[in-house]
Image: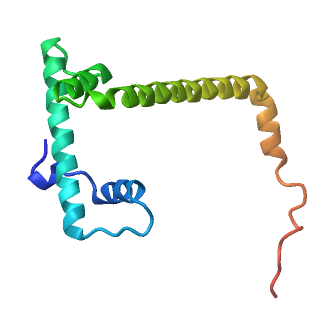
């Protein structure tokens, strides 16, 4: 749990990036405005988390699920965000699945493609050593 109330705030760099992406080029905001937006965003996230936690507790779970967050947003009367969030969630799940599938395929390919050396051939390679030991040596008299 957070030790200080400030620990519950979102990182300033993240808030600054979100603000910059949301505003048209050339628009500058003051530090006070950025601070106010940061505090409002932090309060929103905490409130949404609290509502989502209530849904999870009602179902006797300790882990929040995406459905809990969506239900919380609906309870908070932010249902107009739901179509966009559901679409973003579906896209995220598809990308995560694709990345997982690609990782599995790469692992299978590397396991099947790499030649397996038995211990005797590995030992013989080590015993041979470098081909020419005088090639890169410098002697100082």
Q: Quadrant of the N terminus?
A: top left
Taking depth in this image into account, of 126 and 89 the one nearest to the observer is: 89
Residue 82: x, y in percent? 33, 27
Q: Which colour scheme is used?
A: rainbow
- Quarter of the rendering containing residue 130: bottom right
Residue that appears at 37% across and 30% down: 85
Q: Where is residue 115 in the image (x, y as percent from the top left)?
A: 79, 28
* Picture coordinates of residue 66, whole percent (x, y): 32, 23
Q: Name the residue rendered at 83%, 72% in the picture.
A: 137
Looking at the picture, tell me which residue is in the foreground, 90 or 61. 90
Numbered circles on residues, count: 0
Place residue 126 in its image quadrant.
Answer: top right
Quarter of the image containing the C terminus? bottom right
Looking at the picture, does residue 40 appear above or below residue 44?
Answer: below
Q: In this view, does 55 lie to the left or right of 141?
A: left
Which quadrant would residue 17 be assigned to in this image? bottom left
Quick check: can you spot residue 120?
yes
Question: Which residue is most to the bottom?
Answer: 141
Relative depth, front residue between 39 and 98: 39
């Amino acid at each position: 749990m957070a030790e200080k109330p400030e620990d519950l705030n979102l990182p300033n760099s993240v808030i600054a990036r979100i603000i910059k992406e949301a505003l048209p080029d050339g628009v500058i905001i003051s530090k006070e405005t950025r601070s106010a937006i940061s505090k409002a965003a932090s309060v929103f996230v905490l409130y949404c988390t609290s509502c989502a936690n209530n849904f999870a507790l009602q179902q006797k779970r300790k882990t929040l699920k995406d459905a809990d967050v969506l239900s919380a947003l609906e309870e908070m009367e932010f249902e107009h965000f739901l179509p966009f969030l559901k679409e973003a969630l579906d896209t995220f799940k598809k990308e995560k699945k694709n990345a997982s599938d690609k990782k599995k395929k790469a692992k299978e390919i590397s396991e099947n493609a790499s030649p397996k050396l038995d211990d005797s051939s590995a030992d013989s390679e080590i015993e041979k050593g470098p081909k020419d030991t005088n090639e890169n040596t410098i002697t100082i008299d």
